[in-house]
Image (cartoon, rainbow, N blue to C red):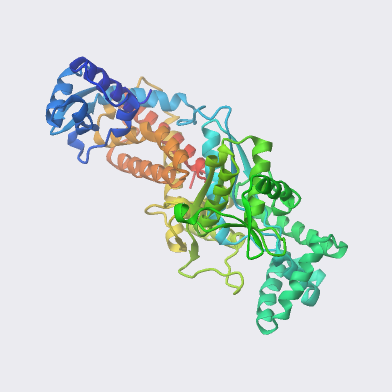
């Protein structure tokens, strides 16, 4: 039981003792959710706003706070005092330190983990690369948000299914085949892989602006794929193989894996079920020759969802519905998350609504995890215009830049290449997961690779600093910890942050927001560095030293766990 839960139970017990006849009181869980951190340290460690109880108790908040403070008697946990309309708590600092550190260290690196997800399955649809296109920086957010959420849910005991919903269907692939047949060279494409295909794709659009007839030729080649033309399928299969080979190098750098690569093409023969059900349930209507599902725009704010074009061709919504039905049958998910940019919000709201109108109660378990766009050093990206920052190039450049910094700052460091990889990749991932996912990101080398401020290298360096202190402590004789030595403000701030980490992980899971973990780990690092400069870790007094070493170990383990949850490695030396 964490500190907030224990405080909330004290409040409930005090209320019952003072006003046993009161009705409509909040539960212990609701009270715990209302506990706040006071703005000034001398106001205490936690505060409860008593106006939450005014209606039920029919008293003014200051009177409630005073009465409850007088009724609470648990010196081993805290002292309670009234401050205006708030009930404030000052924790017993020595006991708080002992209990917190015992809990963190007993978790053996899994502080904050849980089993509330046992027996539940979460599908995560993320990354979703496109065949015949290189993995560019625009795919970074979907990939790392999805990977982080997967690790967070695994940490909480859920069964997760990571799905890479390949973009392997559509007229763009006909255009690729057209471009290859007109201007491609097999040896060049085999040598340069998807980079050569990307050049062909850009050239197609340049040439199509001068000769619009190329668009018809592209559609013809896609029709050949649909019809099973041997040459078209062979070429497309080759393009797919080259793409997966290219992206696998990136996934290995990022430490990302998937359980399924079933893409759009996989569901091409499964859309009949969608059409048949919509017809059977009288949901499909014809409008200007196209088949739609009316979503009652007046009440939902959404235009009709297009299911079939005039020529009978299916659309993204049709395939997404077919995929959701199949995944529910295959995995029986409790939630299915779609980590896709916010521009697709209407698309998801529309087809989620269609699933609901089809009578599936699990439509509520479909979640669009939206995120903002990414630019590079102030410039927007465009595949068609040829301005793309490829993710593999970005990651390799980050590793090289990190190596140069390490050569300068730590010339005697062992395993420089390995540490440079960890720091370089970590810098890129941290830059992506630092802020709320819905915010647009402008990637900057100067910010990402800085060892000062809120960056990946700063957090990793703090972890390495903890490891260094712990290595030095190994040579000293163990002792009984004196937890009174952790009553200073710097240690108590660290302990507060450690005690709140399990709550942080659960909040990140509930809000589909990895940045909550990123920020918590960063604040923990800031607090530790302040503690490190203000207090002598390896103190001459054995009991004091042991207490501070245990606190350092707890911080190190929590930083490492937090970094893992956001997809970043934790070097022990930097």
Residue 24 found in image quarter: top left
Q: Is residue 414 visible?
A: no
Which residue is rendered at x = 25% and y = 29% of the image? 487
Q: Is 189 in front, or is 474?
A: 189
Number of numbered discs visible in the structure rendering: 0
Q: Percent x, y for residue 29?
A: 35, 27
In the image, 570: left or right of 315? left
Q: Percent x, y for residue 18?
A: 18, 17
In the image, 449: left or right of 170? left
Q: Can you say which quadrant of the picture contains the N terminus? A: top left
Residue 19 found in image quarter: top left
Q: Percent x, y for residue 323?
A: 66, 47
In this rendering, the answer to whether 332 lies above or below 162 is above
In this rendering, the answer to whether 422 lies above or below 139 is above
In this rendering, the answer to whether 188 lies above or below 570 is below
Q: Percent x, y for residue 439?
A: 43, 57
List the single residue furthest toward the bottom.
Answer: 210
Q: Is residue 284 visible?
A: yes
Which residue is rendered at x = 75% and y = 58% of the image? 240
Q: Is 485 in front, or is 132?
A: 132
């Amino acid at each position: 039981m964490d500190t907030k839960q224990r405080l909330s139970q004290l409040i409930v017990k005090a209320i019952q003792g003072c006003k046993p006849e009161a009705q409509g009181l909040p539960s212990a869980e609701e009270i715990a959710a209302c506990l706040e951190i006071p703005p000034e340290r001398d106001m205490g460690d936690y505060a409860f706003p008593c106006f939450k109880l005014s209606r039920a108790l029919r008293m003014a908040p200051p009177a409630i706070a005073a009465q409850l403070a007088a009724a609470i008697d648990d010196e081993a946990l805290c002292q309670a005092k009234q401050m205006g309309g708030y009930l404030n708590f000052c924790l017993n600092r020595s006991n708080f330190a002992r209990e917190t550190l015992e809990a963190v260290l007993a978790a053996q690196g899994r502080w904050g983990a849980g089993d509330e997800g046992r027996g539940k399955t979460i599908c995560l649809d993320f990354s979703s690369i496109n065949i015949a296109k290189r993995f560019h920086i625009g795919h970074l957010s979907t990939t790392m948000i999805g990977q982080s959420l997967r690790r967070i849910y695994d940490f909480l005991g859920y069964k997760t299914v990571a799905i890479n919903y390949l973009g392997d269907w559509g007229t763009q692939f006909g255009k690729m085949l057209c471009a290859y047949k007109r201007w491609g060279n097999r040896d060049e494409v085999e040598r340069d892989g998807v980079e050569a295909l990307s050049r062909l794709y850009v050239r197609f659009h340049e040439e199509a602006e001068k000769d619009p007839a190329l668009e018809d030729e592209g559609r013809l080649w896609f029709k050949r794929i649909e019809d099973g033309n041997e040459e078209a399928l062979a070429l497309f299969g080759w393009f797919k193989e080259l793409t997966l080979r290219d992206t696998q190098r990136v996934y290995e750098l990022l430490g990302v894996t998937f359980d399924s690569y079933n893409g759009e093409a996989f569901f091409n023969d499964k859309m009949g079920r969608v059409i048949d059900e919509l017809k059977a349930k009288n949901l499909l209507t014809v409008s200007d020759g196209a088949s739609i599902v009316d979503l009652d725009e007046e009440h939902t704010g959404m235009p009709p969802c297009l299911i079939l074009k005039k020529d009978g061709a299916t659309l993204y919504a049709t395939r997404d519905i077919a995929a959701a039905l199949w995944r529910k049958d295959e995995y029986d998910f409790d939630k299915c998350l779609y980590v896709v940019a916010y521009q697709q919000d209407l698309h998801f709201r529309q087809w989620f609504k269609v699933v609901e109108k089809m009578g599936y109660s699990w439509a509520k378990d479909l979640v669009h995890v939206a995120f903002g766009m990414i630019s590079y050093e102030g410039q927007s990206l465009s595949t068609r215009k040829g301005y793309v920052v490829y993710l593999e190039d970005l990651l390799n450049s980050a590793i090289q830049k990190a190596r140069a910094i390490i050569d300068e700052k730590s010339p005697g460091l062992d395993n420089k290449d390995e540490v440079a990889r960890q720091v370089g990749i970590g810098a890129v991932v941290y830059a992506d997961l630092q802020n709320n996912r819905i915010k647009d990101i402008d990637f900057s080398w100067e910010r990402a690779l800085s060892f000062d401020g809120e960056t990946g290298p700063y957090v990793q360096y703090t972890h390495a600093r903890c490891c260094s202190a712990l290595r030095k402590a190994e040579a000293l004789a163990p002792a009984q910890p004196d937890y009174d030595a952790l009553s200073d403000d710097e240690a108590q701030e660290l302990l507060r942050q450690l005690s709140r980490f399990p709550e942080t992980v659960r909040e990140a899971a509930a809000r589909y927001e990895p940045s909550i973990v990123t920020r918590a780990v960063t604040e923990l690092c800031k607090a530790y560095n302040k503690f490190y400069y203000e207090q002598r870790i390896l103190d001459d007094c054995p009991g004091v030293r042991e207490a501070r070493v245990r606190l350092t170990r707890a911080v190190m383990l929590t930083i490492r766990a937090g970094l893992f949850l956001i997809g970043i490695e934790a070097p022990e030396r930097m």
